[in-house]
Amino acid sequence: MDNTYHTTEHRKGQHLTDEERHEIEVRINKDGWSIYKIAESLARPYNTIKNEVNRGTVFLYNGKIKRYKANAGKAKYEANRKNCRRKYRRLEVGSFIRYVVKQIKEQGWSLDSCVGNALKTGRFHREDTVCTKTLYNYVSLGLLTIKNIDLPEKLRRKQNKSEKRRNRKNLGHSIEERPDYIDLREEFGHWEIDSVIGKKDENEPTVMTMTERKLRVSIWLKLKNHSAEAVDNAISELIDSFGSKYADVFKSITADNGSEFANLSNLDQRGIKVYFTHPYTSCEKGTVECHNKLLRRFIPKGKKISDYSADDILFFADLINNLPRKILRYRTPEELFNEELDRIYAT
């Protein structure tokens, strides 16, 4: 990281210790450190230290001097923790609960009907009731004399699953297995791949996008549809176009878990390593995602890709590849890509 004050250590949810409170007391009272400097020293968020100082600040000498005291901060913290728990109003609204149980058992009402009728008729004031969602929670927790079987509609609805999916797609090597040196972007030949769709139609053409991590050069190809077969054919033709040196151009490819990349792992047989990101983590292939935004300059979301020819897509890629980039010291991806190819084919 270039940022001097960046730390990858996060202690979210961990409360301050007695030792940390005493260090805060010493730093703020004797050394005169700022809250920001203390937070940096303890690797804690700024607001955590600020709130602790506010809690533990006391007035001394008839209110003439303010000082932070670790013991006062701890005492206030422990007092707050006593009230830090989930609160149930079950006992406070006993009369309303009895009304709900009676209406459900005798009249067959729903929980929401009980709440709505009680408020509409003025039988109960708002502060003497709980909402429908809370009533459902009470039933699930067993806090009422009625059960889920007394609520036929609830049994018909899909309930939230409490366990994780066991059968997940496993298309190939996880990005966790990708060598660290690829992250450095110092070696040419490591690509990211994605697909861009227009109208959501299974027969609608799509654009396969590939971006090289070091040079940021993009390859955009129009495919007949959003299928794994279309991607396989396009990748195969692209690789073959580089002849016997294809392994120097394509050393690795990082993809997401989309169904169109289901067969991408077959490239391992040709010496090209394929890695897949974690589900719903597009930031792990951020280079191609950013270049997809550049493609959207020409093909806005919702616009049919069938309105554009394959040559149009190639023309759009040429425009983007010939844009000088600050990260490339204002050289163009196309220029650097050609230099790499010259070097590869010269050996």
Image (cartoon, rainbow, N blue to C red):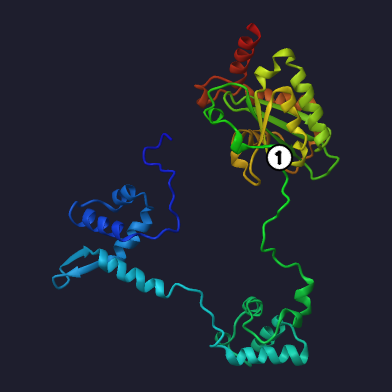
Residue at 34 percent of width and 59 percent of height = 17
Direction from residue 51 to residue 110 in the image, left or right: right
Residue 309 in view, yes or no: no
Question: As displayed, is residue 254 above or below residue 347?
Answer: below
Seen in the picture, residue 229 relative to 333 is either above or below; the reply is below
Q: Which residue is drawn at 72% across and 90% down?
A: 103
Provide residue 197's location: percent of width, then percent of height.
75, 39
Q: In which quarter of the image is residue 108?
A: bottom right
| Farthest top residue in view | 346
Report the front residue among 27 and 133. Answer: 27
Q: Quadrant of the N terminus?
A: top left
Query: Which residue ends up furthest to the left in the rendered image?
Result: 61
Residue pictured at 60% horizontal, 16% vertical: 335
Which residue has dot 1 on it?
A: 300
Residue sitting nearer the eye, 286 or 325 = 286
Q: Is residue 341 above or below residue 270?
A: above
Q: Where is residue 86 in the image (x, y as percent from the top left)?
A: 51, 74
Point out residue 183 in the picture as x, y percentages from the top left corner.
54, 31
Using the rendered view, name the quadrant where residue 101 is placed.
Answer: bottom right
Tell me what residue is drawn at x 42 percent, y 75 percent: 83
Three-letter code, disc 1? Pro
Q: What element carries label 1?
A: loop
Give the crowd class for mark 1: few <14, some 14-19, many >=20 residues within 10 Å.
few
Q: How many marks?
A: 1
Quadrant the C terminus occupies: top right
Q: Position of residue 22 (x, y in %)?
A: 25, 59
Left or right: 342, with 243 as reference point: left
